[in-house]
Image (cartoon, rainbow, N blue to C red):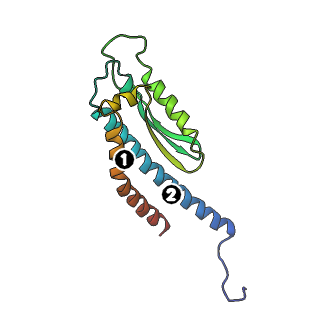
Amino acid sequence: MSKYGFRAIYSRGDVHKRFAEFAQRIHKAIVSVLQYIGEACVAQARENGNYTDHTGNLRNSIGYVLVHDGTIISHNFEKRIQSKIENKANGVGVLEGKKLAEELAKRFTKGYALIVVAGMNYAYYVETLNKDVLDSAERYAQRVKPKMMKMLKEQVYRVVA
C-alpha cells in the first residue's frame, strides 16, 4: 500500500500506450484537415485559372504534397487536362509539379507542411500577366485556415476529454 492510501491500477506502459493513442488520433486529425485544404486548393487553382492552357501542362502541374517530419505522406498530382495541340512537351506537367513539390518538401524536416505548387517553370510569368495560376488557391487557404484550425483544436480537445 502506498504512503497516501492510493494505489495505481495501471502501469507506466498503460500510460504511455494511452498517450500514443492520443498522439495518433491527433496526427490523423491534422492530416485530415491539411489534406482537405490541399485538395480544395488544387481544385480552386485548376478550376479558376483564367489563362489559356494550350498544352494542359500548367494546369496538370498544379498539385500538393503533405509532409510530416520530412516524409511525404499524401499528395495529389493528376493529369486532368488534355492538350489542344500535339507537341512532344505534352504530358510533362504532372512530372514537373511532382518534381518541384518533392524538392520543396526536403526543406521541411520537422512538423507538418502543406505545399501547393504549379510546377511549370513559366507559372510565375503567367501570374505576372495578372492571370490566376495559384493566387485564388492561396487566398482560399488563407481564408479557411483560421476556421480549419479552430475545428482542429475542437477535435483535439474532444480526443483528450
In the image, what residue occupies the spot 33% across and 36% down? 45
Furthest residue toward front: 128
Q: Residue at x 26, y 30 (%)?
A: 50
N-terminal label among 1 and 2: 2
Quote the CA–CA distance across marks 1 and 2: 21 Å
Q: Position of residue 57 (x, y in %)?
A: 39, 22
Q: How many marks?
A: 2
Q: Which of the image's four quarters has the N terminus?
A: bottom right
Q: Which residue is mark 2?
A: 26
Image height of 33 relative to 78, above or below: below
**Residue 2 - label:** none
Q: x and y percent of residue 54 in the render?
A: 31, 18
Please give the name of the residue rendered at 42% of the width and 58% of the height, measured from the top-left corner.
152
Q: Quadrant of residue 106?
A: top right
- At label 1, the amino acid type is Ala
Q: Nearer the viewer, residue 156 or 95?
A: 95
User: Residue 88 falls in which quadrant of the image?
Assistant: top left
Tell me the element at label 1: helix
Decide: marks 1, 2 in contact (CB < 8 A)? no
48 vs 62, left or right, is left
Residue 159: x %, y % from top left: 47, 64
Q: Dot 2: within a 10 Å radius of its alpha carbon, few (fewer than 14), some, or many (20 or more) residues?
A: some
Q: Amino acid at mark 2?
A: Ile
82 relative position to 112: left or right:
left
Residue at the location (64% across, 66% down)?
14
Which residue is identified by label 1?
141
Closest to the observer: 29 or 40? 40
Q: Secondary structure at mark 2?
A: helix
Q: Position of residue 60 (x, y in %)?
A: 39, 26
Q: Is 30 above or below relative to 114?
A: below
